[in-house]
Amino acid sequence: MKALQLFGIVIISAIACNDPVKSPDRMADEKQQGTPSSEDIAMQAQQFKTAEGLRNSGVMIKGNYKFVVKVNGDGSVRSLMISSQDLRGDTTKPAQDSTVIYDVKGKVTNMDVSDLDGDGNPEVFAFTKSDGTDAEGSVYGLTFIQHKAVRIFSGDVDKDSIPGYSGRDTFYVQQRYLVRKFPDGKQLKTIRYALKKENQRYILKEAK
């Protein structure tokens, strides 16, 4: 089970719509992805309350960072558009860069912003759950360094075999850890992961 899916990261600058490499369909899709309204955010809160998952948009704040998240697509495959803004600057101006995570599998059930490694750079995590009885959870993670998105690699989250695992897991952030819980027989098993920097990349490692 691939808990943290491999994904493509695309940085869209203010002039990205002039990029000739993009297809017309992709350009049209990105053009429609704007900052969510207050109605969108209210809808997000209601969807979480009724366990319907995040369908549209949300806003999160961590330190001097403000993140606006927009979910696009439907069915089993979606994309996430995440923009960051420095609250110390002119907050009336739109964010210059956005990061798009494509091929997000399953329903987006929750998102969280954290600083697991305590380096002052916030991370944004999106948690999804597949359809069906297995309801396997997945995690998509980015860390933002000077408002530039850097991929977080799966590491120990993406082990091919986890003892007692059969899906129906839940992920969330608790203090300095990414926590995973899933049923193992009649018990609820818990695994904690810490964010580490190894060989100039960020990776999740099981906390012993």
Image (cartoon, grey):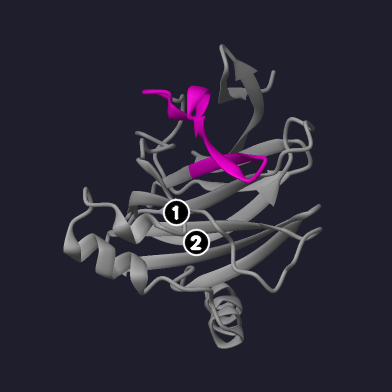
For the residues bearing labels 2 and 1, Cβ distance under 8 angstroms: yes
- Please name the amino acid that badge 1 sits on: Thr
Q: Left or right: 108 with respect to 193?
A: left
Q: Please say if 181 is above or below 199.
A: below
In the drawing, what numbered circle is on residue 180? none
Q: Is residue 157 magenta?
A: yes
Q: Left or right: 174 with respect to 59?
A: right
In the drawing, what numbered circle is on residue 128? 1
Residue found farthest to the bottom: 39
Q: Say if residue 184 shows up in the picture.
A: yes
- State how far apart marks 2 and 1 are (Cα): 5 Å
Q: Which residues are magenta?
A: 140-161
The N terminus, quarter of image: top left
Secondary structure under badge 2? strand
Q: Left or right: 32 with respect to 193?
A: left
Viewer-proximal residue, 58 or 95? 95
Q: Which residue is pictured at 63% across the width and 67% down the height?
A: 59
Viewer-proximal residue, 113 or 176? 113
Viewer-proximal residue, 179 or 35? 35
Residue 194 image offset from top left, x and y in percent: 67, 28
Residue 138 image offset from top left, x and y in percent: 44, 44
Q: Say if residue 186 shows up in the picture.
A: no
Tell me the residue that label 2 is attached to: 109
The C terminus, quarter of image: top right
- Please name the amino acid that badge 2 sits on: Thr
